[in-house]
Image (cartoon, grey):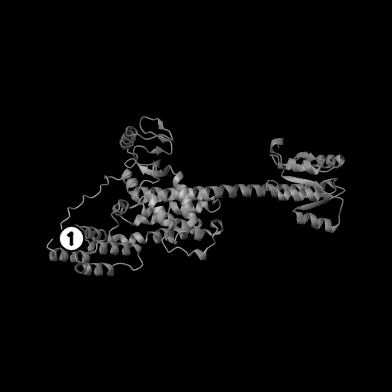
Amino acid sequence: MGSADKQIILLVDDTPENIDVLSGILREEYKVKVALNGQRALKIAETDPQPSLILLDVMMPGMDGFEVCRRLKANEKTQNIPVIFVTAKTDSGDEKAGFELGALDYIAKPIKPDVVQARVRTHVELCVARDEAERLLAENREMLQQTLIGSIRVISDLLSWANPAAFLRAARLRAFMEGVVEELELKEEGWQLNLAATLSQIGLVALPAEEMNRYSTGQGVSFKFLSLFKAQAEIGGRALGQVPRLKVVAEIIENQLKPLPAPGDYPEEIHQRDIHTLGRQLLRILTDFDHKLLGEKSSVVLQSMRNDPHYDAGLIQTLEQVIQKMEWIPCALSTGKIASGMVLDEEVVLPGRGGTLKEGTVLTQQKIDELVTLFKNSQQYRLFRVKVPFKVDQHGNLPSVKEMQALVSDEAVTEPEPESPTKGTLDLAVVKPLITDLASHLEEDDPDSKNLVTKLQTLAASTEAEDQVNQISELVNQYDFPAALELLQELGEKLKL
């Protein structure tokens, strides 16, 4: 066996003669290093390549063997190196003290060569076997980790293919969450919180893509799919709950839309809250914030949430700080969805002619057209990892959800043309049956339903009859209430509209 392949044995003794004896017994089979005092021994033990075993004299001036052993075991880098005490002291109390400090064995003086060789060989073989087991375990752990990361990426990419609007929403939530985790320095639980945001919308794969497009452009989900839309958190959470390492993440996702815990039910200090409570709070705040961006400026939404006692003031303040620092949202988009101004977040190998587009390349329309043509001609279909611009304007407002959706929408988002109002009066008593019938189809504890009924009541009290009936009709159409539509027809006939 070459010297490079030999296991290293560190001999520690203040008497050179003892070192010479032990070295003579071991040097043929092992690479031997020596230290004549405790300080030198600690330094050698920390230096790579580290010894596989330490033979340590107990009785040394200054720092004795017991203190050296204690320091070795207290140091994360040296605590796993096996220690055998070599001593003339045979008192059982000394042996007990050594074992309590972490020593594995004792060799009594005067030294017997056969005993030294046998005990050193046994412990070196055990050390080698342990290191090999740890290496294999680390490799398996790394493989499992990479498999999990790859699986999550596949799930996220599938959402991007199947429902780009849902993927964009998840990308926004992930960007918000990553910013909050970094701002609050949530090191231990951070990966679970980021993952919960990344996969929070996975339940929306059950929703038709066109319905999510309606939601993202402010039209609202059709009543036919409203229950499915509200159940997406439960659908996604239960699906992910089947993955052992994602159980906490799944619970956060499944409970993201449930009522927030009352302030007295959790510690005031953010870092003292358990992962379940903090995860629910953060994901609900971020989901509500993103939802409110459909119709309001981000500065207005934040002000409203700041004044709402249901939301934790500290977390809202952190979100405000994150928003001011935001510049991009990482996304994975197909060639038909990438747009000018986005930045490549990976290196892209161009098919056919060769060459690459480097990570960090700012996409112009010319480069996008080139990408589309090359990948279409080669019949390659893939997602491109890009960064989408997402920063506050001079007024402190983020782009709206509608503006983000317009970047990747197949159709331009246009505002509806205003109706020409017709003078007339619309009596609340006349439209009351409509509101009553509509309310009977809604859940009492559903804020969106209450908001809709309030809008109807406000519209019904207006003096612009035809304009208001049209607006009510538009609202009802969003939620697909057949009975309410019939009442609208009745209403129109009564008012001769």
At horizontal 76% and vertical 56% (from top left) the residue drawn is 100
Please name the residue that numbered disc 1 is placed on.
465
Residue 269, x across and y down, in percent: 55, 58
At horizontal 23% and vertical 50% (from top left) the residue drawn is 416
Viewer-proximal residue, 433 or 137?
433
Viewer-proximal residue, 73 or 281?
281
Q: Is residue 395 above or below residue 369?
A: below
Res 215 quadrant in image: bottom left
Helix, strand or loop status at disc 1:
helix
Res 284 quadrant in image: bottom left
The quadrant of the rendering that contains the N terminus is: top right
Count of labels shown?
1
Residue that lies at the very extreme toward the left in this rendered image: 496
Residue 371, x across and y down, in percent: 34, 35
The quadrant of the rendering that contains the C terminus is: bottom left
Residue 488, x across and y down, in percent: 18, 64
Q: Going by the image, does 3 lie left or right of 393?
A: right
On the question of residue 385 being in view, the answer is no
On the question of residue 496 being in view, the answer is yes
Kind of residue indicated by mark 1: Ala
Label 1 neighbour load within 10 Å: few <14, some 14-19, many 20+: many
Q: Going by the image, does 35 lie left or right of 476?
A: right
Q: Going by the image, does 181 lie left or right of 82?
A: left
Viewer-proximal residue, 486 or 78?
486
